[in-house]
Image (cartoon, rainbow, N blue to C red):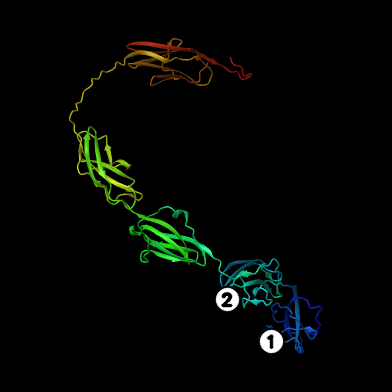
C-alpha cells in the first residue's frame, strides 16, 4: 500500500497499480491495471508520483494523489527492472549544404525491457558547452536533417536514445562538421544502350531515363539539333538525380540528335543521343526486264525514293506466269539492284515484281516490272531416241543353295534357298529323290524367288536328303542338302 515505506535506495523499476473500493462489508473487485510507469524521484521520504489515472471496475474513473489520504486499497505489481538503452551506433554525416546537415545512425545494441521511444538530436558550435535540441518531439526514424545552421561554422552533433527509463549515453561525431556546400562537378551517367544509335519504329513509345550527379543540384536542359526541344512534341521531367525524356508515340519527325546539358553555375556536362525513328520503305523504282536468253531473264531496278529513314538491306523478287498469274518468290534478301531469274519454261510469258526491305520489314506495296519476259521456242527440236527392249529370258539358276541341317525331333524346322530365272520357273521339292506331294507335314513357299520348305514336327523318319529343282523352257537347276533328326531320351538327356 502507499503507507508502506519505499525501499532504499530508489530502484529503476517499472510498476503497475490497481485499486479496490472498501466499505463496511469488504473489498470490491479490483480495477483494471494501470499502464507501466517508473517513479521519477523522492519527496518527503516517500515515493512521489505526479498523478496516476486509474480505470476502476465501476463506471466512475478515479484520479488519486498517493501522498494524500487514502480511501481505497491500492496494490502494486513490480515488473522487470528497466534501464536506459545503450547509445545509438554508427552515427555518420550523409550530406551537408550551406544551411543543413543530414545525419544517419543505427539503433542501440542494447535496448532492454523499457523499449525505445525515439531519439533526440542535439548540436552545438565548436567550443561551446550548450547543446541545442534540433527536434521538439522524439524522432522515431534513424535519419534526420538539421536545418537552419550557420554557414561556415563548425558544428558538433550527437544523438541520444530515449525510453521510459530516460536518456541513453550520447553518440557523438568524432569531428565537428563544417557547414558549407560540398561542390561536385556535374556528371551525366549515360546508359550503355544509349551510347550508340537509338532506333525505334514509328508508333512505339520512347522513355529514356538519364541519371546524373552534382552538387549543388544541377540544372538539366534538352536540345534537339542544337535547339531547345519542343514541349508539344517531347515531354521532359527533371529530378535532382536524373532527367526523363518521354515520347508517347514516336514519329519520323522525332528523329534527330538530342543533347542533354547539365549545368552548375559555370560548370557543365553534355551527353548526345542519336534517335532514329524508322518505318517500312517504299517500293523500288523503274523495275524492268533488260534481257532474255534461253531459260533466263535479267532484271534491273533502282533503290526506293523513301527508305523509311533506314538503310535498305535487300530486295525480294517474285515471278508469275501470265497464264496462271500466281506469284512465286525467286530471291529473298537480294542486296543488289539487279538479278537473273532462271528455270523459266519455254513458250511462256512472265511478269515480275520487287519488294524493298529494311529493319522494319518489306515495303507495303511491290513495284511491277514495266515489261514482261517471253521465253521463245526458236531453235529447239525434239529428237526421238530409239528404245531397244532388253531380253530378260534366262534359265533357272540357284543363287543361294540349301544348307545341311541337324534338328531335334518334335521341333518344327525349315530349309531355304533362292533361285532366279525368266520365265518364272516351276519349283519341285523332293525327299530322297521322291517328289513331295500334298503331305500336310510339309509347307512349300515361294516369295519373289526365295524358296522355303517348312517341316512340321519332324521325326527320325523325316531325316534324309532333300532336293529343290527349278525348271522352265530354257533349262533347269537343282540343289540338295542333308537333314539329320536327333532324339533326346528322357532318362539321361542323351541325344541319339
Q: Is residue 111 above or below residue 31?
A: above
Q: In the image, what residue occupies the spot 72% across and 72% down? A: 84
Characterize the local packing of mark 1: few (<14), some (14-19) or many (20 or more) Cα atoms within 10 angstroms.
few
Q: Which residue is mark 1?
A: 62
Residue 494 rendering spot, x and y as whole percentages? 61, 17
Q: Is residue 8 above or below residue 60?
A: above
Q: Is residue 466 above or below residue 223?
A: above
User: Is residue 311 found left or right of 455 in the rendered image?
Assistant: left
Using the rendered image of the protein, determine whether residue 345 is visible from the camera's viewpoint: yes
Residue 335 rendering spot, x and y as whole percentages? 32, 42
Choose between 392 and 109: the one closer to the eye.
109
Work out which residue is located at the far front of the displayed protein and give it: 266
Choose between 48 and 297: the one closer to the eye.
297
Q: Residue 61 appears in which quarter of the rendering?
A: bottom right
Indicate which label's residue lies in the foreground, 2 or 1.
Answer: 2
For label 1, the SS is strand
Do the CB atoms of the residues marked 2 and 1 lie less than 8 Å apart?
Answer: no
Find the distance from the CA under tag 2 to the CA under tag 1.
Answer: 46 Å
Q: Is residue 29 above or below residue 369?
A: below
Q: Which residue is mark 2?
A: 148
Q: Residue 65 appears in which quarter of the rendering?
A: bottom right
Compare marks 2 and 1 and give the one earlier in the sequence. Answer: 1
Amino acid at each position: 500500500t502507499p503507507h508502506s515505506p519505499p525501499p532504499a535506495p530508489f530502484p529503476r523499476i517499472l510498476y503497475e497499480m490497481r485499486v479496490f473500493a472498501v466499505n463496511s462489508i469488504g473489498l470490491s473487485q479490483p480495477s483494471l491495471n494501470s499502464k507501466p510507469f517508473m517513479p521519477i524521484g523522492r519527496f518527503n521520504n516517500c515515493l512521489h508520483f505526479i498523478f496516476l489515472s486509474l480505470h476502476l471496475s465501476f463506471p466512475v474513473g478515479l484520479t488519486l494523489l498517493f501522498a494524500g489520504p487514502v480511501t481505497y486499497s491500492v496494490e502494486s505489481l513490480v515488473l522487470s527492472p528497466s534501464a536506459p538503452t545503450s547509445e545509438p551506433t554508427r552515427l555518420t554525416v550523409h550530406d551537408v549544404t550551406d544551411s543543413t546537415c543530414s545525419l544517419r545512425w543505427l539503433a542501440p545494441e542494447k535496448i532492454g525491457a523499457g523499449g525505445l521511444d525515439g531519439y533526440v538530436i542535439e548540436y552545438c558550435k565548436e567550443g561551446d558547452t550548450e547543446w541545442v535540441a534540433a527536434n521538439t518531439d522524439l524522432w522515431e526514424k534513424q535519419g534526420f536533417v538539421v536545418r537552419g545552421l550557420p554557414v561556415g561554422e563548425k558544428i558538433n552533433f550527437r544523438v541520444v536514445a530515449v525510453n521510459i527509463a530516460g536518456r541513453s549515453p550520447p553518440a557523438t561525431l568524432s569531428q565537428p562538421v563544417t557547414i558549407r556546400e560540398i561542390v561536385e562537378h556535374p556528371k551525366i551517367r549515360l546508359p550503355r544502350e544509349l551510347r550508340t544509335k537509338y532506333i525505334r519504329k514509328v508508333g512505339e513509345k520512347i522513355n529514356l531515363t538519364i541519371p546524373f550527379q552534382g552538387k549543388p543540384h544541377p540544372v538539366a536542359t534538352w536540345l534537339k539539333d542544337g535547339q531547345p526541344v519542343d514541349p508539344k512534341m517531347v515531354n521532359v521531367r527533371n529530378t535532382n538525380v536524373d532527367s526523363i525524356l518521354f515520347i508517347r508515340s514516336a514519329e519520323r519527325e522525332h528523329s534527330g540528335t538530342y543533347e542533354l546539358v547539365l549545368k552548375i553555375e559555370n560548370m557543365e556536362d553534355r551527353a548526345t543521343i542519336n534517335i532514329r525513328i524508322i518505318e517500312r520503305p517504299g517500293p523500288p523504282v523503274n523495275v524492268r526486264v533488260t534481257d532474255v536468253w534461253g531459260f533466263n531473264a535479267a532484271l534491273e531496278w533502282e533503290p526506293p525514293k523513301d527508305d523509311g529513314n533506314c538503310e535498305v538491306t535487300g530486295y525480294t523478287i517474285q515471278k508469275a506466269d501470265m497464264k496462271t498469274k500466281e506469284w512465286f518468290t525467286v530471291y529473298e534478301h537480294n542486296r543488289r539492284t539487279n538479278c537473273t531469274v532462271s528455270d523459266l519454261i519455254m513458250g511462256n510469258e512472265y511478269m515480275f515484281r520487287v519488294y524493298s526491305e529494311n529493319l522494319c520489314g518489306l515495303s507495303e506495296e511491290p513495284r511491277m516490272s514495266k515489261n514482261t519476259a517471253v521465253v521463245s521456242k526458236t531453235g529447239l527440236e525434239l529428237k526421238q531416241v530409239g528404245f531397244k527392249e532388253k531380253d530378260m529370258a534366262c534359265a533357272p539358276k540357284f543363287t543361294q543353295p540349301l544348307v545341311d541341317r541337324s534338328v531335334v525331333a518334335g521341333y518344327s524346322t525349315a530349309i531355304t534357298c533362292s533361285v532366279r530365272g525368266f520365265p518364272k520357273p516351276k519349283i519341285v521339292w523332293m525327299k530322297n529323290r521322291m517328289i513331295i506331294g500334298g503331305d500336310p507335314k510339309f509347307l512349300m513357299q515361294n516369295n519373289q524367288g526365295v524358296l522355303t520348305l517348312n517341316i512340321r514336327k519332324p521325326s527320325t523318319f523325316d531325316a534324309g536328303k532333300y532336293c529343290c529343282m527349278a525348271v522352265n523352257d530354257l533349262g533347269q537347276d537343282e540343289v540338295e542338302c542333308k537333314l539329320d533328326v536327333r532324339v533326346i531320351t528322357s532318362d539321361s538327356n542323351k541325344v541319339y
